[in-house]
């Protein structure tokens, strides 16, 4: 990973080197590269509002500043992502092969690479959401279940109530509804992740 000093060096020299050399040598490439970088920032940071007229050095400055402000990078195995998204490991591998984790490519065909949470995921309907956001929702839900002072029976009842709420919302069990739906929206993917976690939790409670 780049150091803060390296990023500062890129910021300081980008205008002189990029705008004054590449722009003069090949204006067509300069504009094409600027557009590609603009699109990459928009895809990996869907909430950002970037002016299409920004020059290359401004885009690089924005990218470097984003890295400076970023939280420590976390990455996930396909198994961890499967639990977060509420799907199988096979589904996660299929999404990787389809390019639905934007900007991620396998290293040398290795199926055990780790996927950083800084990347975004796109649904089949074209909606984009960051892996970090999906993981945060999953973790928030799990933390809400760790309530102190609740006896095992009350905890089990609370889990069943949550599962029942999803069954009423979608009109059936997980296997009958989201579990068999091929194309899901982002809200449905989030609900699926939480629903799977609840079913796993209820199974663990019953087997304890």
Image: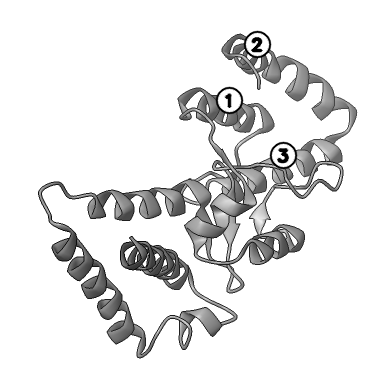
Q: Secondary structure at mark 2?
A: helix
**Residue 196, labelled with which disc?**
none
| Residue drawn where x is 63% and y is 52% of the image | 78
Residue on which disc 1 sits: 64
Tell me whether circle 2 and circle 3 mark residues in contact (CB < 8 Å).
Answer: no
Q: Compared with residue 51, is residue 154 higher up or lower down, i.e. above or below?
A: below
Q: Secondary structure at mark 3?
A: helix
**Which residue is farthest front?**
208
Q: Compared with residue 110, is residue 5 higher up or lower down, i.e. above or below?
A: above
Whole-percent x, y for residue 72 in the image: 49, 27
Considering only order in the chain, which callout, 3 or 2, is on the residue closer to the N terminus? 2
- How far apart are labels 2 and 3 at the CA level? 19 Å
Residue on which disc 3 sits: 34
Residue on which disc 2 sits: 9
| Residue drawn where x is 55% and y is 84% of the image | 180
Front residue of 78 and 63: 78
Badge 1: residue crowd in 10 Å (few <14, some 14–19, many ≥20): some
- How far apart are labels 1 and 3 at the CA level? 15 Å
Whole-percent x, y for residue 36 in the image: 73, 45
Tell me whether circle 1 and circle 3 mark residues in contact (CB < 8 Å).
Answer: no
Whole-percent x, y for residue 205 in the image: 31, 63
Q: Is residue 33 left or right of residue 177?
A: right
């Amino acid at each position: 990973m780049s150091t803060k000093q390296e990023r500062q060096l890129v910021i300081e020299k980008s205008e002189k080197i990029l705008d004054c050399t590449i722009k003069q040598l090949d204006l067509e490439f300069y504009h094409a590269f600027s557009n590609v970088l603009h699109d990459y920032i928009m895809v990996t940071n869907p909430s950002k509002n970037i002016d299409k007229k920004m020059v290359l050095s401004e885009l690089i400055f924005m990218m470097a500043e984003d890295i400076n402000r970023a939280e420590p990078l976390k990455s996930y195995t396909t198994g961890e992502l499967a639990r977060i998204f509420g799907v199988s490991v096979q589904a996660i591998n299929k999404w990787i092969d389809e390019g639905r984790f934007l900007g991620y490519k396998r290293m040398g065909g290795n199926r055990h690479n780790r996927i950083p949470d800084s990347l975004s995921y796109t649904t089949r309907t074209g909606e984009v959401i960051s892996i970090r956001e999906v993981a945060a929702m999953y973790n928030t839900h799990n933390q809400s279940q760790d309530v102190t002072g609740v006896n095992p029976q009350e905890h089990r009842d609370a889990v069943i109530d949550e599962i029942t709420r999803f069954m009423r919302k979608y009109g059936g069990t997980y296997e009958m509804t989201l579990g068999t739906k091929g194309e899901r929206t982002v809200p449905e993917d989030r609900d699926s992740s939480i629903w799977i976690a609840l079913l796993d939790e209820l199974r663990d409670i019953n087997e304890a």
